Amino acid sequence: AKSYLEQVDLSEIGMASKDPTARRKDPLDRAVAKSPFQFEVVAARLIRDYQREKAPSPQWQERLEETVAVDLKKARAMVKTLERYKDPKTLMACYRVLTQAYPEEAFYWVKLATATRQQGNSSQALENLRQAYSFVVKAEDRAILRFTEGELLVALDRYPEAEKVFTRLSERQAGNWKVFYNLGAIQERLGKNDTAVGNFKKALGLNLPVKY
């Protein structure tokens, strides 16, 4: 079955027009009016309107904030729906709103950093992520931020800094094989082959589940 977004012919909707008659013919507007809390419908309209506007207008930003900032459970549901459409610009705008609405949630900071990196801007991703340390207080959540920070430093070829991040993580998360694997890979890049081999062996010897 096609999604709401796939069913709509954008050329016939008339969203660019301010003509109220054209807007009343918009099937997505009608669907949202009928089911304002049906996430797929709302997400489809948000994406369609963003694509039409080319840049987030104040009205679009307001609709997004109203949709995702109601409560954390609904916000997560909206994110999952938006991610299915794989529209990076809309997702980044959504993640920015969510980091403002729920600054204590590491989940959204990581999402924003990852999306920004995928758009080819690892420096901005790192800058965004580091803002999270002022808000995220839970030790396990801060560890997730550190892990992502280390990955971003690697993407930026800043290996000595990345090594420090993963070394610190290895001291606090002795059961996380991914930490030791990344640390070993970084040390290999830095020419510390003996130390790298030791960390690779630690990674191979760990089978505990991790959340990353």
Image (tube, rainbow, N blue to C red):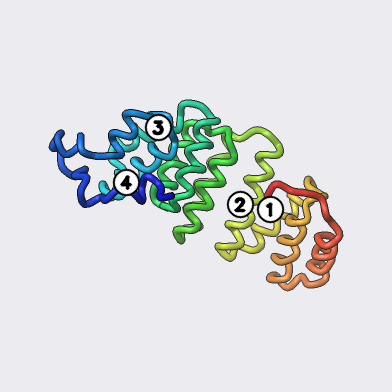
Is disc 3 surrounded by few (<14), some (14 to 19) or many (20+) residues within 10 Å?
A: some
Sequence-wise, which precedes: disc 1 or disc 2? 2
Residue sitting at 64 percent across and 55 percent down? 150
Q: Disc 3 residue type?
A: Glu
x, y percent for residue 47: 36, 45
Q: Disc 1 residue type?
A: Val
Q: Which residue corresponds to mark 4?
A: 48
Sequence-wise, which precedes: disc 3 or disc 2? 3
Sequence-wise, which precedes: disc 4 or disc 2? 4
Q: From the viewer's side, name the closer residue of 146 and 58.
A: 58
Name the front one of labels 4 and 2.
Answer: 4
Q: Secondary structure at mark 4?
A: helix
Q: Disc 4 residue type?
A: Arg
Q: Which residue corresponds to mark 1?
A: 165
x, y percent for residue 138: 68, 34
Residue sitting at 62 percent across and 51 percent down? 148
In the image, 187: left or right of 65?
Answer: right
Sequence-wise, which precedes: disc 3 or disc 1? 3
Q: How many marks?
A: 4
Q: Is residue 159 above or below residue 171?
A: below
x, y percent for residue 130: 56, 45
Q: Secondary structure at mark 1?
A: helix
Q: Quadrant of residue 185?
A: bottom right
Sequence-wise, which precedes: disc 4 or disc 3? 4
Report how far apart the C-alphas of labels 1 and 2 lie in the structure: 8 Å
Q: Which residue corresponds to mark 3?
A: 65
Q: Which residue corresponds to mark 2?
A: 149
x, y percent for residue 173: 78, 47
Report how far apart the C-alphas of labels 4 and 3 lie in the structure: 16 Å
